[in-house]
Image: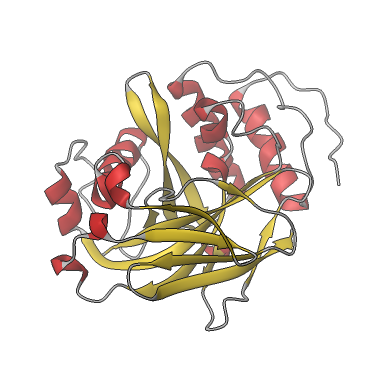
Amino acid sequence: MIADQASTTGSAGSIAGHFVDARRRGVALPSYPGEKPAAMTDAYRIQDEAIALAAGTVAGWKVGKIDPPVEGRDRLAGPVFADQVVAADAGGAVPMPVFADGFAAAEAEFLLRIGTAPDPAKTSYTTAEARALVDAVHVGIEIASSPYPHINADGPLVTISDFGNNNGLVVGDAVPGWRDQDLDAWPVSLRINDAEVGAATTATMLDGPFGAVRFLLENAAQRGMAVTAGQWISTGAVTGVHPVAIGDRVEARFGDGMRVGCIIDAR
């Protein structure tokens, strides 16, 4: 279904309102609802407005890679709301909704859980300091979906403006003994309808999953966004961003035998 687009001034609040309304109604936005952000500050201002309008519980944050970097930044962030965090089932059949007429993709990711809330006044971290705040590592799938079908094609600033293109997490099993593991050495693959569409390791992802947590802590502190114990950090697409369609069966495989799956459903 396509949303009727009202006239817009292009302000951050107006753009955020269009995105939040389209997400609530499960409809698509055929064109960007205003003037596209020209700078990081503009993009995050729209996202911050949208978080306030959505009025949902932020249960975590997604982190994505920016390549090539924009304004010297090589990652972006977006909120994950509590009603979109789903525990995986044994059969890999948990339904995950996407916007049928918008953008939809699935990503294999390590999900790291914050165990100790950071000092909100601290705006710079080492990776070791970020790692010390994590109390669990799980395997998972991020569902990337937006009412706006060109969200990825239009670049990272547009992606940031609509919740970082996040529409949910599938939380799989915990990685046992993760503190003694080298996650960068784990093979990761993603399959859609039993066909492998991507394979890689986190060694190709900047400074890895814990580096993604470091970035998120700094980003949130600089924006005045609280990071709390129990929140998830979805640390980036290991094998890439893989388009999906309604009815697709998705399975991510990690290391020696860990798997998590879902079925793509219409929102």
Residue at 44%, 49% in the rendered image: 237
**192 lies left or right of 45:** right
In this view, 203 is above or below 148: below
Residue at 24%, 42% in the rendered image: 207
**33 lies left or right of 206:** right
State which quadrant residue 162 falls in: top right
**228 lies left or right of 107:** left
Q: What is the x, y in percent for residue 87?
A: 50, 74
Name the image quarter holding the C terminus: bottom right
**135 lies left or right of 77:** left
In this view, 211 is above or below 17: below
Q: How many marks?
A: 0
Question: In this orientation, does residue 148 appear?
Answer: yes
Q: What is the x, y in percent for residue 233?
A: 37, 55
Q: What is the x, y in percent for residue 253?
A: 44, 67
Q: What is the x, y in percent for residue 24?
A: 72, 51
Residue lying at the far front in this picture: please name it. Answer: 195
- Pick the residue in front: 147 or 204: 204
- Pick the residue in front: 167 or 203: 203
Residue lying at the far bottom in this picture: please name it. Answer: 90
Residue at 46%, 57% in the rendered image: 108
Residue at 55%, 62% in the rendered image: 191
Colouring convention used in this rendered image of the protein: secondary structure
Question: In this orientation, does residue 116 appear?
Answer: no
In this view, 29 is above or below 189: above
State which quadrant residue 5 falls in: top right
